[in-house]
Image (spheres, rainbow, N blue to C red):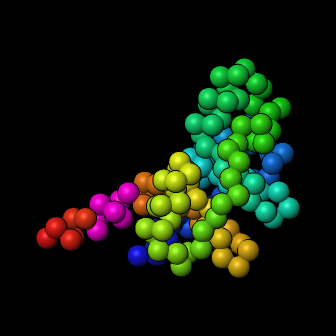
């Protein structure tokens, strides 16, 4: 099974200078708990709702004055939608990643989460046991 079959095709991105308050509003509006952080159309990292809570809020920063770059996880690693999910899972395990941006032709086309990968592994194990 390829990454493109598992990924969330509704991947949202923000710029490095986006405020944490704006990120929170986008997450609330879209239901996303993770956003890809970009600069000049290049992927720079990932920010999650947990990053915001444990970073900006716990540190006492003001969310509308605090920028994403202060609390995001740097991540330049991406995968192709045609990559087999097992290969993506090895990359995620080796680097202790929860999310991988999926890029095709230089464009962000999705976001793969460890939950999606684990669900695929579970399905494969269940099917092979039958």
Horizontal side of 128 relative to 70 (left or right) equals: left
Residue at image point 65% right, 22% down:
58
Q: Quadrant of the N terminus?
A: bottom left
- Residue 8 screen position, x and y as percent: 52, 64
**Residue 66, percent across and down?**
80, 33
Residue lying farthest to the left in this orientation: 130
Identity of the residue furthest to the top in this view: 60
**In the rendered structure, does residue 120 fall within the stretch colored magenta?**
yes
Where residue 14 appears, as percent x and y from the top left, is: 74, 53
Specify start and end residues of the magenta stretch as a single range.
118-124
At a point 43% along the width and 59% down the height, the residue shown is 116
Q: Magenta stretch: residue 108 in it?
A: no
Look at the picture and state if 58 lies above or below 100. above
Give the residue displayed 34% in from the left and 63% down from the top: 121
Q: Which of 33 and 43 lies nearest the eye of the viewer?
A: 43
- Where residue 100 appears, x then y in whole percent? 58, 59
- Front-most of 9 and 130? 130
State the quadrant of the C terminus.
bottom left
Q: Which secondary structure is most common in the magenta stretch?
A: helix
Residue occupying image coordinates x 78% and y 42%: 69
Whether 73 is drawn above or below 102: the answer is above
Q: Quadrant of residue 56?
A: top right
Q: How many marks?
A: 0
Q: Is residue 19 visible?
A: no
On the question of residue 3 being in view, the answer is yes
Q: Nearer the viewer, residue 17 or 87?
A: 87
């Amino acid at each position: 099974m390829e990454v493109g079959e598992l990924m969330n095709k509704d991947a949202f991105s923000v710029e490095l200078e986006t405020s944490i308050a704006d990120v929170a509003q986008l997450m609330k509006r879209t239901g996303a708990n993770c956003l890809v952080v970009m600069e000049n159309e290049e992927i720079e990292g990932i920010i999650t709702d947990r990053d915001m809570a444990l970073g900006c809020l716990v540190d006492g920063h003001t969310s509308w004055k605090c920028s994403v770059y202060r609390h995001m996880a740097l991540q330049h690693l991406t995968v192709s939608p045609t990559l087999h999910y097992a290969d993506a899972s090895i990359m995620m395990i080796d680097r202790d990643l929860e999310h991988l941006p999926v890029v095709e032709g230089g464009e962000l086309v999705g976001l793969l989460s460890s939950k999606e990968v684990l669900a695929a592994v579970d399905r494969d194990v269940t099917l092979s046991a039958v």
